[in-house]
Structures are given as C-alpha cells and as structure tokens.
Image: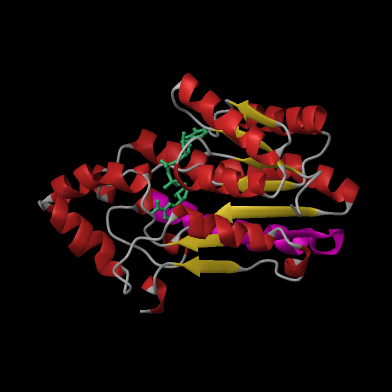
Amino acid sequence: MFLKGKSAIVTGSTSGIGLAYAKALAAEGASVVINGFGVAAAIETERAALEATAGATALYDSADMSKPDQIAAMVARTEEELGSVDIVISNAGIQHVAPIDEFPIEKWDAIIAINLSSTFHLMRAAIPLMKARGWGRIITTASAHSLVASPNKSAYVAAKHGIAGLTKTAALEVATHGITVNCISPGYVWTPLVENQIPDTMKTRNLTRDQVINDVLLDAQPTKQFVQPEQVAALALFLCRDEAAQITGANYSMDGGWTAA
Ligand code: NAD
C-alpha cells in the first residue's frame, strides 16, 4: 500500500478509465476524490466500495469540468477535508463526431472546456499545494489523438494535442519541485465513451455496428484488441511511484501499436 497517507483527485471517475484509476489508487491505500456525472445511488455504491478498499476516505465531488470555479472549489475542498492534494489525474472527457463544416459550435466549446481547459484549471489550483509539500503527481489522460488525427473529431483531436503540450509545459515549470507531470495516451479502450460514439459513426460513415467496431475502431489498432481500463490504471499507478520520479513531460502511448504505424 505505497499510497497510504496520500490524497488523489480523479476527474471523470464515475465511469470507464477514471473509475479504474480510482480503484487502482484506492487499492494502494490512497484517499480518493471521485468526480463526474451519473446516477446518485450508483456513485454512492462506488464511493463506499473505494473507501472499503483503501481503508481511507473516499469523497464524491460533483464539480462540472466545464466550470473553472467548481474545479478550484473541488481542489480546495480536497485539501481541507483530506489534508493534501498529492495526486491529480485529469481524465474527464467527452466526444462528438461530425465534419468541421457541420460541427455544432456548442459541442466544440464543450469539448475544449472539458477535455482541455479543465486540466489547466486543475493544475492551476493544485500546483501551489503540491509545491508547498515538495511532492506531486499530475497525470493527464490524453489519447492516441494527442499524436495523430482522425476525420470528424476536430474538437477532440485539437483538445488532446493541446493536453500533450500543456502536460509538457507544466512538467518543465514544476520540474525542481518534486512534481512530475505526464500524459497517458490510450488507443481505443472499451468504455461507455467508445460505445456511445458507435451510433454517430454508423450514421456519418453509413456503416453497421460490427463494421464500426472491426473496420473503424480496431482497424487502427494493430493488436486488434481494445485496451482495458485496468491496463491504463496500472501505468498511472507506476507513475505515482518514487521509481518514476525522473519520468516527467512524457506522453505514454498504450494503443496496441496504433501510433507506431
Ligand atoms: P467515459 O464516458 O466512460 O467517462 C467519462 C467520465 O467523464 C465520466 O465519469 C463522466 O461523468 C465524466 N464527465 C463528462 N463530462 C464531465 C464534466 N463536464 N464534468 C465532470 N465530469 C464529466 O469515458 P472514458 O472512455 O473512460 O474516457 C475517459 C478519458 O479517457 C477521456 O478524457 C477520454 O478522452 C480518454 N480516452 C478514452 C479512450 C477510449 O477509447 N475510451 C481512448 C483515449 C482516451
């Protein structure tokens, strides 16, 4: 339990990869703040399970990642109620699939706010607290789309390329403070975010569900398998270790070979 006594915030952790991060951190004894949308009873069940696993506190915070004041308040609440903010995993994300000339302006704005700007606001609030203790781990969930593009995902690709640049910048700024900042860039991970974009892709490309899964999603992934959320979480856990203290400003691909092509 190498994270006993540490506190972590994981945004977008009511589902998918975020929930896997929270479970991995709790399994190593960290107090965890989970965040995101969903059914209250289901979130409470996950929160209680995390607390039981960690033997430490687990909190739920409903901060909307498109609202800078709510992000700052979540960080302040964590410091106050858990005593420190040691690990921040910026993970909340949404997707919308459409060509640029048909892309709804409000979807562009929401994706940039939630997938990119929220990470800036989290860093801005958490870095002074980490600097004060001389230790911190900031991890961002980017994507293979931080390195390569796909058609019809303009806002997502722009936001994820932005995350990669923001992560490198933050790493340089805090390098002498015992704080590391790294990206994890998964390929297709089997989560609700991927499942939910299948109908749009079927419509925009005029394909069946099986064609979208095999010929579009897994077409890019040479291993022909989805990444599992627990595999992403295992890498994040390693980045929290003292052995990873010299890994900073890196962008780790976990994409079944997608970006090697
Ligand atoms: P998911 O849809 O399962 O989970 C997204 C989480 O973000 C949920 O908890 C949701 O409630 C939360 N969320 C959405 N809008 C929010 C907001 N405004 N404020 C707070 N929380 C909000 O998705 P996932 O697949 O687990 O994706 C997690 C991250 O991983 C995203 O940043 C995504 O871009 C990235 N990613 C996913 C894949 C994949 O294939 N699933 C691949 C690469 C990167």
Please tell me in which quadrant of the rendered image residue 174 appears: bottom right
Number of numbered discs visible in the structure rendering: 0
Q: Is residue 165 visible?
A: no
**Residue 191 location (% of width, % of height):** 38, 47
Residue at (44%, 36%) from the top-left corner?
Answer: 110
Q: Farthest residue toward the bottom?
A: 261
**Residue 115 location (% of width, % of height):** 50, 45
Q: Please, which colouring scheme is shown? A: secondary structure
Q: Is residue 19 magenta?
A: no
User: Splitting the image into four quadrants, where does ligand 1 fall?
Assistant: top left
Q: Is residue 70 visible?
A: yes
Residue at (62%, 48%) from the top-left corner?
Answer: 89
Magenta residues span 156-183
Please tell me in which quadrant of the rendered image residue 74 appears: top right
Please tell me in which quadrant of the rendered image residue 224 appears: bottom left
Q: What predominant SS class does the magenta segment belong to?
A: helix
Q: Is residue 166 magenta?
A: yes
Say if 112 sits above or below 41 in the image: below
- Seen from the viewer's position, the closer of residues 42 and 222 is 42
**Residue 216 location (% of width, % of height):** 22, 61
Say if 69 sits above or below 168 in the image: above
Relative side of 14 to 237, left or right: left
Residue at (58%, 33%) from the top-left corner?
Answer: 49
Relative side of 47 to 94, left or right: right
Residue at (35%, 79%) from the top-left corner?
Answer: 261
- Seen from the viewer's position, the closer of residues 248 and 106 is 248
- Seen from the viewer's position, the closer of residues 6 and 48 is 48
